Image (cartoon, rainbow, N blue to C red):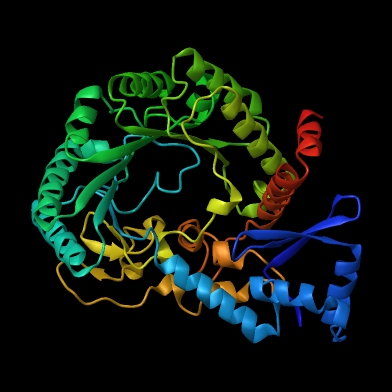
């Protein structure tokens, strides 16, 4: 009997007090020095002594202890089955009316995408029919359609027309319709937002990469002009005029840009956005692999910016925590991406690449996803505890940025630091509140 390989020991959270955290179940327990010594002895094949029996049985029942590798593989298989359920009760479709974009952001791997152009009317009709049939076959009680591109607002006509049809179709089926829109924001306006909101509950995500100077250095029109003022004005207008729409702000930072993102948060607060946003979620730019963006510095910046967001009261929900990390839509049963040619994918990052499509909306035939062939996460380090929540990382993004099928996109250093910080904090807040307050103040 031994610790599951998905259990992480965090030593000396308090003197002589340690935490065992299970990534699979998102649970933790506190143990003392004697328990750690027992765990080490059991791993070496030593017996469970009578005085240890009760503790061993409790840890075994919780899943912290396993008999061997086969049991860990069963735990991973269970985590994959859970991931396959995606968002229970929802059928999730990403619709791409175009792969073209009016911006040329310097770090975007899609800025020179080989596939351009709009979805043609006959493809649009076939795509909407496919969605209606797929939802009807499912047990989902809600259809969620995410519009993305390219830039979906280059096709406002398509977005409103397709949303109107799908909203009506779901009403006939007795199911709900929701929408999401991921946009660069330069073409967003209140009239459009109101029209889309009338068709169902929805949310809009915009990107602001720091304050004006930093944002305008990377997120530019194709003629090189910056976009900050236009995007920020659209965010403020929709936030104040359409409170029923959930607004999310994303951003991508590089090392040394912390002050610019803090200035952006100050600008957002000054514009009256406190409490009007669903979330603010910044992340490091990934260029050339994990080594350029991951590790302690990126994690420190994430902690700093999440804290700064909370202090300003900008969001209606707490910043995302490690307990919300889970495999993406690539691994969900009821999640699909449809590109402008009508091809079907499980991963947005490779949409527009025919060789990686699973099928087509004009046919019911589907093939296994080449991104998952051979279960690439099996090549991950055998001691990595994070496989149940990442399953190899962003497999599609790895391919889209020049990697080969079967390679994994590992963010382990960043994950290790994020989990260590958050689990220690959660444990102290639950069991040692005073010490947690003092640590935060320090």
Camera-side residue of 30 and 91: 30
Residue 60 visible in the snapshot: yes
Residue 56, image x, y percentages: 77, 76
**In the rendered image, which quarter is residue 435 located in?**
top right
Q: Does residue 369 appear left or right of residue 20 in this picture?
A: left
Camera-side residue of 439 and 182: 439
- The residue lying furthest to the top in this view is 270
**In the rendered image, which quarter is residue 303 located in?**
top right
Number of marks present in the image shown: 0
Tell me: residue 224, above or below residue 387.
above
Tell me: residue 71, above or below residue 237.
below
Figure quadrant of the C terminus:
top right
Q: Does residue 268 appear left or right of residue 310 in this picture?
A: left
Residue 4 visible in the snapshot: no
Figure quadrant of the N terminus:
bottom right
Camera-side residue of 403 and 410: 410
Q: Does residue 333 appear left or right of residue 44 in this picture?
A: left
Camera-side residue of 154 and 411: 411
Residue that appears at 49% across and 71% down: 80
Residue 379, image x, y percentages: 61, 75
Residue 412, image x, y percentages: 67, 58
Residue 407, image x, y percentages: 56, 69
């Amino acid at each position: 009997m031994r610790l599951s390989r998905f259990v992480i020991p965090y030593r000396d959270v308090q003197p002589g007090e340690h935490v065992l955290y299970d990534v699979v179940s998102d649970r933790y327990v506190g143990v003392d020095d004697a328990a750690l010594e027992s765990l080490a002895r059991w791993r070496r094949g030593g017996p469970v002594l009578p005085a240890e029996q009760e503790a061993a049985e409790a840890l075994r029942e919780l899943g912290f202890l396993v008999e061997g590798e086969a049991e860990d593989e069963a735990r991973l298989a269970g985590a994959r089955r859970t991931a396959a359920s995606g968002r229970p009760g929802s059928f999730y479709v990403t619709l791409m009316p175009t792969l073209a974009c009016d911006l040329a952001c310097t770090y975007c791997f899609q800025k020179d995408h080989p596939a351009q152009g709009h979805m043609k009317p006959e493809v649009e009709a076939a795509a909407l029919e496919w969605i209606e049939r797929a939802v009807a076959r499912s047990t989902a009680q809600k259809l969620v359609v995410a519009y993305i591109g390219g830039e979906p607002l280059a096709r406002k006509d398509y977005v409103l027309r397709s949303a109107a049809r799908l909203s009506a179709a779901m009403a006939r089926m007795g199911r709900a319709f929701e929408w999401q829109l991921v946009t660069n924001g330069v073409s967003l306006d209140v009239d459009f937002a109101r029209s889309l909101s009338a068709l169902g509950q929805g949310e809009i995500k915009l990107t602001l990469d720091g304050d004006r100077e930093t944002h305008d250095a990377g997120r530019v029109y194709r003629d090189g002009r910056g976009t900050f003022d236009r995007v920020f004005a659209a965010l403020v207008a929709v936030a104040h005029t359409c409170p029923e729409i959930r607004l999310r702000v994303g951003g991508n930072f590089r090392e040394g840009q912390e002050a610019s993102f803090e200035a952006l948060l100050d600008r957002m607060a000054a514009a009256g956005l406190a409490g009007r946003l669903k979330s603010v979620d910044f992340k490091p730019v990934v260029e050339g692999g994990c080594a350029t963006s991951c590790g302690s510095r990126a994690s420190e910046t994430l902690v700093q910016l999440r804290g700064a967001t909370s202090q300003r009261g900008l969001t209606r929900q707490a910043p995302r925590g490690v307990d919300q990390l889970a495999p993406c839509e690539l691994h969900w049963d009821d999640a699909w991406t449809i590109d402008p040619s009508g091809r079907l994918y499980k991963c947005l990052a490779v949409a527009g690449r025919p060789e990686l499509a699973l099928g087509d909306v004009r046919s019911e035939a589907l093939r296994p996803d080449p991104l998952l062939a051979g279960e690439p996460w099996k090549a991950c380090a055998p001691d990595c505890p994070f496989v149940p929540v990442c399953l190899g990382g962003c497999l599609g993004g790895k391919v889209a940025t020049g990697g080969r099928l079967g390679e994994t996109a590992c963010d382990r250093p960043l994950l290790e630091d994020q989990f260590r910080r958050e689990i220690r904090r959660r444990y102290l807040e639950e069991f040692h509140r005073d010490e947690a307050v003092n640590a935060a103040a320090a």
